[in-house]
Amino acid sequence: MNKKMLDRLRLILKICFILLLIGFLTFLIFPGLFFSSIKTYNAQSIRIIFLLLIMVLIFTKLYIKEKAKAITVTDTVTSGPNSEWFRAEAEKLFKRHGTKGYSIIQIDIDKFKFVNRRYGFSEGDKLLKYIHDMLNLNTHENELSARLLGDWFVMLINSSKRGDIISRVEKIINDISCYPDVSSKKFKVAVKCGIYILKAKKETVNGAIEKAIIAGRSVMSGYNSSYAFYDERLANSIIDAKQLEDRIGEAIKDGEFFVVFQPKYCLNNKEIYGAEALVRWNHPERGLMLPAEFIPIFEKNGFIVSLDRYVFEMVCKQIRWWLDNDYHIVPISVNVSQVNLYKTDFVKDFIGILGKHCIPSEYIELEFTESAIFENQIALHKIIKEFKSKGIALAIDDFGSGYSCLSLLGIMPFDTVKIDRRFLSGNFNTNSGRVVIKKIVELVNTIGMRVVIEGVETDEQADFLKNIGCNIVQGYLFSPPVTIECFNKLINNIAEKIQLL
Ligand code: C2E
Ligand code: CA
Ligand code: CA
């Protein structure tokens, strides 16, 4: 029975009750009039019938009340309890036993949006139901579990020892990972768990859930499930992030974001081949900030879309200035966050900016990270086609940092593969590692894509890369990211600079 049916039943019940009351009162006040057509009647039995009917109505009302209560605490997707029930029951347990000895675990399905997008909402709902069932299996006496909202679940467990909690969480993670493939397609379910161990002091259910969520946020997204415990420093970093978020609007208005350029060098002719535009934030209180300090926050709150657009426009303006002032121009790569891929006007917007500043498309390259490409293959196919039809070059960034799916190289028509600096440093020091780098460079060259290696820091690395056929490199050995003034000087003094190498 659903809520709509219950409401209908409630209305029918009300009407019956009113009719019965009218009938009963009429019978009490004008018994003769009411039953004038009946010659013999037994007032006593009529009274009993009325009373019986009223009792039936009262029982029905009580039944509806119970059902309604069950509906308000039932989660529509999992058919298990919902978050209101969880909060109320946890409150009761805390009142009875105190908060000490309990822990809250928040469970978040990693990349749940991907399941919905790729396989549809019904598969998404099936997965939610499965997670609920697994948590339910792992919930013991005097413990609770429920869906909190969206793809977040919450558990209250009767344990406060880290070792015990870890084995419980690992068991849950293991049970969840046994999910049969979504629609028989290969998909591994991973979850992020945030854990908060309640203290003896008075704590509220909501406060404890919030702390578990904060802990959960600190777990990195990835291929495998993971968990983290709450600690105060985490809470401070969230406050920090909030303060940065609050300044975004003003920061754009006050021109606090600016672009630096890191040259890419060609090892063969020792010339600057191109450059990558990298954003910086000149924060009035915190000073110069690197992207690692604010991009993850902007990716979460969506502001990255505006920032990427802003950086792209600054780069276009710069190229326009070089064109107008007869400068030597090299192609500039701009980083694009995957958040853009789901903005319907993303391609139109970027092409519009290019047109507004009359920039020939050969001066621009867009870099998409390997993980963004892997996770958004469907959305990307269309986007790649549109950019390529306008002659804009595209690069796979950070190749080798994540899943390193080689088949991506075959199916996605990118122009450039940028090998991640961690891939270079992680493999360069062993023979087998160097063979892997060599083979990847050969593979990329063979399929006709350009290969760029970033993070080149030593002469040995540069010599090795030149020998294996990787001619374009980027790294501190040649130049760190520099301001536009420095970059202009670099471009004009290529010969001088190369002599320093
Ligand atoms: P990325 O695209 O991989 O950029 C290269 C990063 O490696 C830059 O860090 C650069 O300073 C650093 N790097 C270059 N050569 C070396 C080297 O030889 N050794 C070492 N250790 N590091 C080197 P940066 O500027 O801090 O940027 C970090 C990341 O932030 C970038 O990684 C990129 O993913 C992101 N990012 C930067 N600007 C933007 C932007 O405008 N939009 C978006 N969406 N992301 C951006
Ligand atoms: Ca990049
Ligand atoms: Ca990179």
Image (cartoon, rainbow, N blue to C red):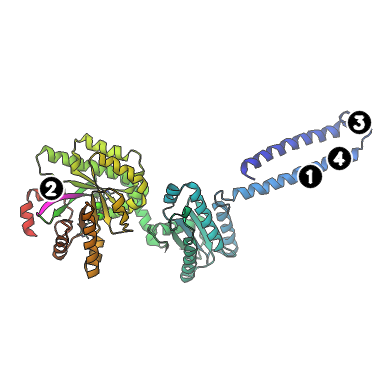
Residue 229 picture quarter: bottom left
Residue 485 numbered mark, or none: 2
Q: Position of residue 458 (x, y in %)?
A: 15, 64
Disc on res. 420: none
The span picked out in magenta is 269-276
Judge whether residue 250 can be spotted in this image: no
Q: In this view, does 182 lie to the left or right of 43?
A: left
Residue occupying the point 86% across, 42% down: 48
Between 129 and 238, the one lying in front of the other is 129
Is the C-beta separation of discs 2 and 4 under 8 Å?
A: no
Whether the magenta-drawn stretch holds residue 39 is answered as no
Between 230 and 449, which is closer to the camera in this rendering?
A: 449
Which amino acid does the dot numbered 1 rest on? Met
Residue drawn at point x = 25 percent, y = 64 percent: 436
Element at badge 4? helix
Mark-to-mark CA distance, 1 and 3:
26 Å
Mark closer to the observer (3, 2): 3
The quarter of the rendering in which ligand 3 is drawn is bottom left
Q: Give the main secondary structure, helix, strand or loop, of the magenta stretch.
A: strand
Residue position for label 4: 47
Three-letter code, disc 4: Arg
Could you tell me residue 153's position as x and y percent?
A: 50, 56
The verdict on label 2 being within 8 Å of ligand 1 is: no
Which part of the image, by quadrant, shows the C terminus? bottom left
